[in-house]
Amino acid sequence: MLASGRFRSSGSCVTDPVLLLLGTGLLLFSAALAQLAQKRIEGRIMFYWICAGLLVSIQLTGGSSSIFYSAYLLFLMWASLPSNGGLATELGLVIGFIEAFSLLNASIWTGGESLISRLIPLLLPALKALLVPFLFGLASDWLMERESYSWDSAYSREKDKNGKGDKDSPSTASGALYPLLQIIHKNSKADSTCLFTRNDDGFFRLAEHVAGDKIVISRFMLPAKHRLTRIADNSRETVIIRANSRKERSELSPYRFPGTEDEGSLWILLCPLRGERTLEGFLLQDFSGNRPSDGIISDLENLSGILHGTCSKEAFPMGDEFSWMLKLITACNENSLDKTVQGLAGILSELMPNSTISIADVDSMHGRTRVWVSRGPLARLRGGKVFDSSAGMAGWILKNRVSCRRSRIRYGGKNVHAFSIESGMHDGAGSCMGVPVIREKEVIALIMAEHEDDNAFMQYHEVILLAAAGMFSMREELAGLRHRFKNISGRDTLTGLPGITLLDRHLHHMAVEVQTYGWYVGIIVADIDGFDTINRKLGYGEGDRLLMDVAVRFRNCFSDDVFIARTGSDSFAACIPKAGKAVMEAMSQRAADALSFEFKGKISDSSVSVSASIGSIYTHVNRKVLLLTGEAEKAVYDARAAGPGTYIVRKIGLSGSEKN
């Protein structure tokens, strides 16, 4: 703004084609952002980006004397629409302040007079620059918030007054409902009774309303994502909502004029009117003080039946149910467990919009619950956090192993929290729901859903979570069976050690570790010298005992993090992570010493001397890791040629093997 003020004070801003082109581009960019905001992109920050683009573009092209100055007023009118949150007054003040500041900055530094003499003539233009957008924004908000009666109601009153009316007028159908609303309103003694119907553009319009003398109805349009419309869309039956705080009252009763709000509880009775596929509207009554009785609820439901025939409808048509079930099956079919969890969280977030979906891993041994993935408004307080498994609703589910659904969790003496009892972790949630993922009669994971509304989750939401948990459980059962089968099929039946297939799979994993961290990894292969001769001398039964003894001795040479495998009839291999030259030499020497011993047969008194030739290869090149086994076997041949019980250690670099 300082720079733009300098440009304008020089008098070259308006005539400079470069600045004019830049200002036009910024103006078009702001218009594109405004169009994006209409595509259901929420967030007040979007309005500030649009405002900033307008400010810069108009300042570059002349400020309040710019040819684009009228864009301010159009923007303020657009911002005051109900779907955009009514920010015209606030943004008008921001625009006015920048205009006034830029005007003073552009002119106060010119001339040779004193600062006061230059400042006084500028006060009135600066005040005008400040007040014009501010007052225009205030007027725009007032026009949108003022008490407004629909043209249909005005026509109906005029028709009742004159005793006649145009039968082709669109108000005829709407006006016929007005007496019914009056009867229901009078019998229920409600503060107001309203009928909202959906327009083609997705907004819900206040078609008819009856209110008491002290209640003034102002807002007559509600966006599709408003809290009231979301509650109606997620409900199949009449919903009772209680608003205690001033914030809740203003959020749940935007149709009331703000000056008519009273202190205390406000009960809202909401009955949805559903069509074949979508919500077509809802009936609404509000009551100050006491909770509405069952008779009032019954009367409202009867009126709903008169208006729309019936309110009953399946939560999901068969086609939609098939669609989301197919998506869940596809997510659970992923090979990677992380992809499965991410896919389930994304699908559940799509099925339950504006909810926070969290999938947590349960560590029963240490009593901890770690949130694996979280999607939604509260994700920053959930994702990656570790909670006590005994706390919150998660602890209740782990203990009882059944699903749980709670509403109005922010009220009452004993709060119900999803994961933790920590202060501040649950303030944004008004209702929560969770189901366990059970494998082999143990809870291994949790799927939790949280929403800011007090009664956001219905029975069909719980069905969706149970379906996801069941598929996830079956996926884990199948993965466990596959892992067990691979371990059984890939192990040596004599020694119980993994075979060459499992060793190859382990080397693929080590190649990723080497590429990620740059560690060294090594393979030690030990072959029994002259095993064929020993086997013929002792017999095959004693030869098997010898192999089992060698396997135990070879296993005891290494720590638990070393992968041991049997790679041939008389050869064994060890994959050593984080192994350099010194480690490989020490491990090779230990293996050579351990495998040099006298073996006595049980059947005959004969004994044989056992030794092993050992080849050791290590590398830090990830592309060479899969070649370690073959190179180690070559080193074994060289060691056997040098003599029984010899070991050779080599390093594989980028250029090839290096003999140590």
Image (cartoon, rainbow, N blue to C red):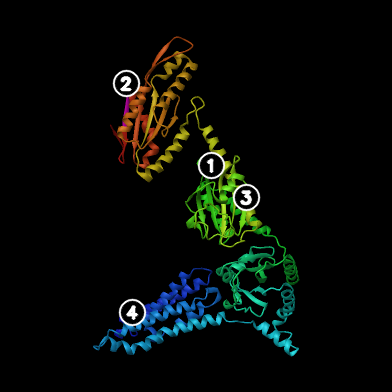
Determine the residue located farthest toward the left in the rendered image.
112
Confirm or deny contact between disc 2 and disc 1 (CB under 8 A).
Answer: no
Residue 540 on image: x %, y %: 49, 17
Report the residue marked by disc 1.
Answer: 364
Instruction: Decide whether residue 646 is among the magenta residues.
Output: yes
Q: What secondary structure is found at the residue carrying circle 3?
A: loop
C-alpha separation, residue under disc 3 versus residue under disc 1:
18 Å
Mark found first going from the N terminus, 3 or 4: 4
Circles 3, 4 touching at the beta carbon (< 8 Å): no
Q: Can residue 638 be seen in this view?
A: no
Residue 289 found in image quarter: bottom right
**Disc sitting over residue 4 in the figure:** 4
> Which residue sits at x=50%, y=30%?
491
Q: State yes or no: residue 521 in magenta.
A: no
Q: Where is residue 453 in the image (x, y as percent from the top left)?
A: 58, 62
Would you call the spot at circle 2 few (<14 residues within 10 Å), some (14-19), or many (20 or more)? Answer: few
Q: What residue type is labelled 2?
A: Gly
